[in-house]
Amino acid sequence: MTSLSDSEIREIESKAQHIRETIIEMLVAAGSGHTAGPLGMADIFAALYFHVLKHDPKNPNWEERDRLLLSNGHITPVRYATMAHAGYFPVEECLTLRRFGSRLQGHPEREKLPGVETTSGPLGSGLSQAAGYAYAARMDGKHFRVFCAMSDGEHQEGNLWEAAMFAGKYKLSNLTAIIDRNNIQIDGMTENIMPLEPLREKYEAFNWHVLEVDGHNIAQFIAACDEAYAIYEKPTVIIAHTIPGKGIKEIERDFRWHGKPPKPEEGKKFLDELRTMGGKISSEHQ
Amino acid sequence: MRNPDVKLAANIFEKPEMAPTRDGFGKGSVEAGKADPRVVVLSADLEESTRAEWFHKEFPERFIEMGVAEQNMATVAAGMANYGKIPFITSYAAFSPGRNWEQIRTTIALNNVPVIVCGMHAGVSVGPDGATHQMLEDIALMRAMPNMTVLSPCDAEEARKATMAAAKRGSPVYIRFGREKTPVMTTADTPFEIGKAQIFWKSDPSLGKAGFPSVAVFATGPLVHNALLAAQQLEKEGVAVTVVNVSTIKPLDPMILEIAKSAGAVVTVEEHQVNGGLGGAIAELLAKNAPRHIEFVGVQDQFGQSGKPDELIEHYQMGVSHIAAAIKSAMSQKN
């Protein structure tokens, strides 16, 4: 990876905006699903698929690809939308989300859709799968990286801390974890439901290298991924501070949007907001 | 009489060799490791008692110490299998699959990656450790899971073969092992194949009164030996019995249905809750295809307790006399 020019960063930001539009469209079509998390992670997923990850959309099982395991499977709309925009499958297929017979299951399934890497949904088990993956790859001298995207709320699961201990013990430097630190979970704010702070110090105590970034600053996030790559002897966790629902004012920071989709009329309004850049331009771009 | 085709040990009734089925895992995992470099063994701080240390000594670089963390062990193994390894995960059955069932369901079975879950110290025969460590629900837990193969070997030799076969399966497998030394009934020449049951004992067809067909006894695990002892005893009394070793509980061998059809009644024998285990599996099969009266020998919806293995097997009514009584009871209820 090399440092990015301003125009390259703007291009990734623009991808993220398209991903947000697709997320709204697919959630409206599905009539169920999670909204805030996927919107909040759109910038990071765009940065991953359009710059950080070594991957080939036409050959999703390419052996040397970097692996991205999504632990909190419920934000899978952002992954599906990003994969579609990256060329894994037609963007139109996103509208089959959660439908009978669709490859785009409500929570991702490895055997249904090439490229999703693993099956997830029940929380707290992604990091250990990623750690196992990284451990096995290191045994064989493989050079690809293993990424694991997680939510903040799932840090209330014990399994996750078992994984953190394991990755710390075995110094899995080929593992990079990304935490969507958006401070919300289904029933409210994480610090009210079951406090996670001090999160940074917890990971440091488990022998991880810890980085904190603005999860909507593409350049900062990419720089953190570069630093993680350069760190030896430790796994790295990037705590990405994000705004849940980022991009749509009505959804931003409202935990009630964690687990519900927009209604069709709301969807229309939200798409208008996204496509007019929040009213900055007079006609919708497509 | 014993079935000559399955080449049982000559001394099964007179001072048989004794070995715990977990030793079969120890041997089988080393042999599987030699045959395939992808095999790895994960241990949750129990390598001596699970016999994972045998593999550890042979392949230190392919042995992974997980600490006391069974949920992490299952999910790390899922990641390793997803990459391309063939992981065996080892602990007591009470903890794995007892504690990490959801992780096994989502990341191994639904994910459909070839992890072999090895549940040691199953059954009341763990003895003095008491009910917390006497896993009696593992077959039910694992049998209910799509994509999962469930094996319950009858002795150390069959456990060795089951371990090696599981490594070649290419999909999720559960294998149940016991702690105690139990009779070694099979030999290196006894056939073993996942999905195949074996007739160990079949009474002479001329035996029996008033043309009463034989009673089919479907047994699993080391209790197969008690079933054989019961059959031997009853043969002397003129009761015709077929004893089948059901070492694959899922998928069930279709032959079981044919044997049950030709039998007058059925008895199931397992060191497990009678709910949802081998008895449950046979009952489901027969209820749909060939209803038969079934007597269920096993733990009757109770937890175990501390004690010596033999006295617990007797207390929970899985001894030779209980199996013999169940066979007679089944005869009196014949269809």
Image (cartoon, helix red, strand yellow):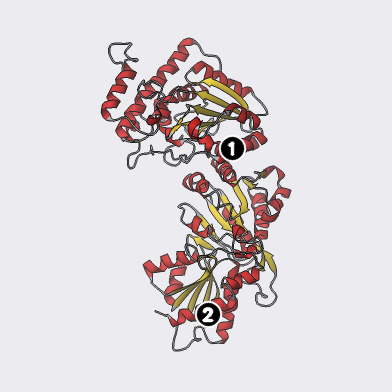
Let me know if residue A174 appears in the view: no
Residue that mark 2 sits on:
B325
Corner quadrant of residue A167: top right
When the figure is inspected, residue A246 is found, relative to residue B266, above or below; the finding is above
Residue nearest the observer in this picture, B60 or A236: A236
Residue A125, horizontal then vertical, whole percent = 53, 40
Characterize the local packing of mark 2: few (<14), some (14-19) or many (20 or more) Cα atoms within 10 angstroms. Answer: some
User: Residue at 56% of width from left, 18% of height from top?
Assistant: A223
Relative horizontal placement of residue A107, taking residue A262 as reference (left or right): right
- Reply above or below: B189 against A224: below
In this view, the residue farthest toward the bottom is: B210
Per the image, the residue denoted by label 1 is A161
Q: Position of residue B170 (x, y in %)?
A: 53, 49
Q: Can residue B211 be seen in the rendering of this structure? A: yes
Of all residues, the one furthest to the left in this rendering is: A265
Parent chain of label 1: A
Of B6 and A99, nearer the camera is A99
Instruction: Say what secondary structure mark 1 lies in.
Output: helix
